[in-house]
Each structure stands twice: as structure tokens, then as C-alpha cells.
Image (spheres, rainbow, N blue to C red):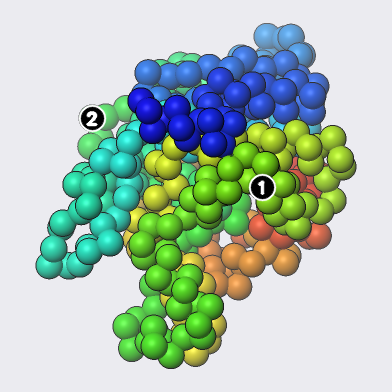
Amino acid sequence: MAATQLRQWWTASNPHLLLESQSSLLRSLVRHRHRQRSHPSGINWVEFRSKQKSASNANLPTVILAHGFGSGLGFFFKNVDPLLSSGEVSRVLCVDWLGMGGSARPPCRESPIRSVLHSSSSRFSLCNSEFSTANKAVDFFLDPFDEWLHDEARDGEPLWLFGHSLGGYLAGKYVMRVHERSSQVEMPNIEKCVLASPVGFQPLPKVNERMPTSDLPAAMRLVDALWSSNFTPQSLVRMMGSSRGKSSVKKALRGRIPHLNDQSTDLLSDYLYHITVAPASGEYAMNSLLEPYASAQGAGVFAREHIGEGEIAKAIRQNLHRSPLKSILTCFGDHDWMRSGHEASARAEMESISSMGIRSKFDIVSNAGHHLYLDNEPELTRLILEG
């Protein structure tokens, strides 16, 4: 209790202020009204409904927007109105993964933390976390998401699942999971899946292709050491305290997304600060799910369990005869840092899925970087609706 109070004093943040910053952001920048909700699984989510009242709305899809690493549902503030105003969507549900955003933050022992001393021959963990391996870390996020979706999806309503970055990887993993289940288990009615700038298509480089740590530049050796030690960017902001932390978050946000106006930047940076300094939990997925590697061809971030090389297609094929999935789309920004390492594998995966009769597509969003949902919202919205 004392440690929690000290942290909240130092960071000038607490769960109430986090949710207030979320509500202020959405009230100010989204025309459609939202309802903030929480689920027994610990998931925080908000619901937006179409203002257009008609009997046909009951047959329109619900879009689920799932954020990436270090982000939160508030980052989709530019996407809600265009989707609902299109007349092709009945609801938009923005969801925070467990341990991130405004969702519950399970403590270290219940988080997806990979032991500093982890190896193939040892399962020792400084936290004794049951989620220290990659497949268990996926369970940490997908088990509560599955519970939430089971409870909140309406009977028979079409679902469109959109995931960005790490959220795109988890969305792909979720599609695989529901198709790998026993045929006696009901499958959620996901008709469309959009993987936006997802990590994870490219397999880990082979051992003989990896550059030895001793050959890396000093800066990359430092990144590798911090990454392996579960030191996250959020940890650094927490150490700064409220004044320096808030100014650093705002400066970083302006650098990554410079085209936002002052109001959007102020509201988004305040929200980002609060979700950043909340207790460490889901952010440990940086090490448990992902791994940085450098080779002679370059450096990149890879998923410890990839979703390329036919993995998604193989999972769908197991229950293709009863799959509701009609289309799947993967897209990257044209100057997206994630694109170069994963484009070829993503294209190949879409071709594998297409061979089964499911409409699949790979696309590039113009004038967009990694945050393509903010960089070029109109083009991304069109892809979601047409995909």
C-alpha cells in the first residue's frame, strides 16, 4: 500500500485520473458519445453506437479496435466517427488489452514477464510468473479478451476485428486460436480481420544468421541488455516523475505524430502519460513475446512465435468448413518502420489464405508511418470497409 501511494505521489497519477484523461480525450475529439465499461476479466473498454436508427442496423457489423504496445484505446479517436458515419457499421468497441491502457494491471507474478535467467533448460523466474513463455504470454492477453468478447458480442452479429502492431499480432493469434478449437466449441462470428502494421509475420532469424552480441555497436548492445532485463520505456518515464515525465511523453508524441493539432496533442499526451506510468504489467510482453535481432541484412523486432509461413492459414484450415471468416487484410504504412521486415512474409500469408477461398488482401497505406490509423485515417477507413 505504501509503495502504491508513493508511486502515485511521484507520478501524480492514479486509476481515476487515467480514466478521466481517457474520457476527456474521447468527449473532446469524438462526436459520437461513448460509454466507458469494465469487464470482470479486468478489461477496460468503451462502446460507441451509430446515431442512425433503423431496423437494418441490427444486421450491420460491430468493429472491434485493439491497440498496440504501450498504447491504449484512446489512440483510435480519429477512427470512430468515420466508421460509424459510413452507414456500414452499427457499433465500434475500443478495447484495452489486459495489463495495458485502462485495464487492470496484474502484479509481476501474474504478468507476462520473461525471467532474466530464462533458458531452455531452466524455468526459473524472478517473479515465478506462469506467463513467462511466449505461448503463455499470448494466453495472458487472449484469455480475458475471449471472455470479454463472449459476454459482450450480441448473438449473431457480424464482428470485424482490427488490431494494430502488437494488437495486430494478438488479433492474428486469436483468429488462429478460435479455428484450432474443438468443433464442439462455438466460434465467435468474426467475419473480417484487419491486421494493421502487425509484428510477427517474419520468423526469427536462424542462429547462424544472427550477429553476435559482442559485434553489435555499443548502443545496440545497451538496447539488447535492457530489453533482456525487462526494462521498458515505461520504466524510464516512471522514474522521471510527473513534471519531466509529462514533458518527455509530449515531446516523444510530437516527434512520432507531428501532424496532430495542439488540442489533440495535449489531450493525447496527457492520456498517454497516465497509461504509461500506471503499474507495470502487460508491457512485459515486450520481452516475453518479442525479441530484437540484428544480422548482416539489418536489425528488427521479431515475435518469438511467428504467425507467418502459413501458420494462420494452417489454423483456419482446421475448421474451414464452419468458419465465419470472409476476409482478412494486412496493411502497413508506406514509410512504416515495421514494413521492411514483415512485408514479404505477410504477402505470402495472405496468398496462402486466399487459396482456401477466403478473400485476403495485402495493402500499403500511403502517406503513413507505423501509426497509420492516425497518419492517414481516410485511406485506412476505406480499406477496413472494403476489405
Looking at the image, is mark 1 or mark 2 earlier in the sequence? 2
Name the residue beneath numbered marker 2: 184
> In the picture provided, is 247 more to the left or to the right than 216?
right
Please tell me which residue is depicted at 72% across the width and 66% down the height of the picture.
Answer: 335
Q: Residues within 10 Å of mark 1 (few under 14, many from 20)?
A: some
Q: Amino acid at mark 1?
A: Arg
30 versus 78 height, above or below: above
- The image quadrant that residue 330 belongs to is bottom right
> In the picture provided, is 241 more to the left or to the right than 246?
left
Name the residue beneath numbered marker 1: 244
- Where residue 163 appears, x then y in whole percent? 55, 44
Q: In this rendered view, identify the residue nearer to me: 82 or 105.
A: 105
Element marked by disc 1: helix
Asked if the residue under mark 2 is in contact with the one under mark 1, i.e. CB atoms within 8 Å, the reply is no
Judged from this view, the residue extending furthest toward the right is 261
Please tell me which residue is depicted at 67% across the width and 17% down the height of the picture.
Answer: 34
- Where residue 327 appears, x then y in whole percent? 55, 45
Please tell me which residue is depicted at 48% across the width and 70% down the height of the picture.
Answer: 223
